[in-house]
Image (cartoon, grey):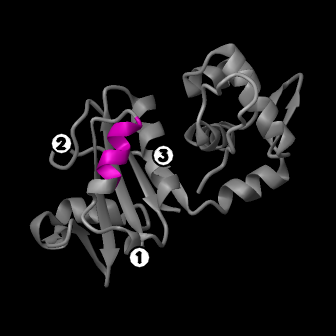
Amino acid sequence: MELISMSSVGPMARYSDAHVYLAMDVIYAKGRISRSRLAGELGLGEGSTRSLIKLMEDWSVIEVKRSGIDLTRFGRVTFENIPMRLVDAYSGNYAIGECQQGMVIVGVADKITNGMKQRDSGIRNGSEGATVFTMRDGRIGFMDDWDIEERDPDFAEHIRSYGLGDGDVFLLVGAKDQLSARLAAISIGLELL
């Protein structure tokens, strides 16, 4: 899923589709937020944040008032209908990186072969690695033949607690900092949609 169509005119954007999704996620979770606080959450400078806000305002997904930035009704519905969500997760057994981010992506398990493409995408997008788990036929697996249900039932139960359903994917992305882990997880998720 591509959110931003890059223009050949003007300065290069310092933000990505992942930043757009993360901005919506932050505003959705926290409610009205200031531009400077949003910039901090996104790891962007003032100019890039202003440009991102303008883009999102043009799309009618946010409204900017003196009291802060909030999602419009359309923005909330749009965000709620993107079939992925960030979840807090950590496992020293399945992902490397001091900070880790989980993500559930609904209905894309058939797009996963062995998870290497997603791991490589995560690394290209700033992570140290990414591990992909799929739910197929009621069982959570890793790669083609690693049955998490059998080998690590506690972690399988942990993954299930996020509401994973048949055909869904759970990503565990590790990086040096939480923002990099989040942006890499979102990038992988958007590529799968």
- Residue with the mark numbered 3: 187
The kind of residue tagged 3 is Ser
Q: Mark 1 or mark 3, which is nearer the start of the sequence?
A: 1
Q: Which of label 2 and label 3 is nearer to you? A: 3
The kind of residue tagged 1 is Gly
Residue 138 x, y percent position in the rendering: 31, 81
**Is residue 5 shown above or below 167?**
above
Secondary structure found at label 1: loop
- Residue with the mark numbered 1: 167
| 42 on left or right of 118 | right
- Residue with the mark numbered 2: 92
Residue 86 x, y percent position in the rendering: 48, 49
Residue drawn at x 32%, y 79% as measured from the top left: 136
Q: Which of label 1 and label 2 is nearer to you? A: 1
| 135 on left or right of 66 | left
Identify the residue at the far bottom of this view.
137
